[in-house]
Amino acid sequence: MDVTFETRRHKEGVAFLVVKSLRVAVTFRGIANDFRALLEAGDLARGGLCDRLRELTESLAFDQKEKAHLLFRNEKRYGSGAGADAQDMRSALAGMKVSIERRTIDSYVGTGFHLLLILQEALYQVERYAPELQKEREEIQRLLAMADASSYHFTEEERAELARLETVEGISSALARDSVDLAKRIMGRCETVMTRTAEVIRRFIVSASDNEILILNLLENRDLVENVYGVGAAEAVLRDLCAGPQFVGPTGVQRALSFVRTHCGNVTGVASIS
């Protein structure tokens, strides 16, 4: 295969992964915020979060996982540099840094994807069975109220059946509580993994100063970068990324703009940036 084509395809893959990762982070944060609000309101079962998670895992998160595996899963390992001269040592250390970063991204992305699936299943249990359990409780209370209002006296067999219903209801209630507790624990774990994934992605971005396609995509998605990393993050990321002698301009955004205008064929998406 043409080396130039292969290099460009790799650059496109990296840019795709970074943007997908930022979109996953933003989408998940919205779900996590709503999860906490619904939990506080005691209405987690009616929040519809399971469907939102399913949409995330079947689209953005799945694409992110597949691209990370494709790009980084079979990367070569670097030696220790023992016996090499200073230049070889520096090259080996730089290669190890990139290799470790890429394997870390692959690990975090894969772990995050599977945790999202577990969270989706836990929320399915909550949303599917908790409303039914509540209906069953209400029906039992309705029957008891009707019996009390009509001064109805339960037979021994009916009292035994009520006792069995209460036992089953207690078991169902315990299962519902366990599902909520599991969802809370997995949500916390997901938030930790998502935060760490965003951190390692940001470190990785800075090491890709030769990737004009990534730089162009970061320029086009500055709002997304700031949504994930905070106000002013787009300028900070581009300043760190575009710090080499091949970049010119007083700010990170301007250095990035100058670079992509020279190295990219289609820059219509950033034409209005000054």
Image (spheres, helix red, strand yellow):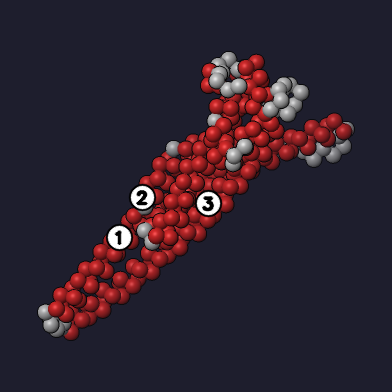
Q: Nearer the viewer, residue 213 or 88?
A: 213
Determine which quarter of the picture holds residue 102.
top right
Q: Nearer the viewer, residue 210 or 250?
A: 250
Residue 190: mark in rendering: 3
Determine which quarter of the picture holds residue 212.
top right
Q: Disc 1 marks which residue?
A: 131
Residue 48: mark in rendering: 2
Marks 3 and 1 sit apart, C-alpha to C-alpha, by 25 Å
Residue 215 placed where, x, y %?
62, 26
Determine which quarter of the picture holds residue 167.
bottom left
* Residue drawn at (68%, 24%) of the image: 255
Residue type at mark 2?
A: Gly
Tag 3 or tag 2, which sits nearer the N-term?
2
* Residue drawn at (62%, 17%) of the image: 261
Label 2, residues with CA under 10 Å away: few <14, some 14-19, many ≥20: some
Tag 1 or tag 2, which sits nearer the N-term?
2
Residue type at mark 3?
A: Cys
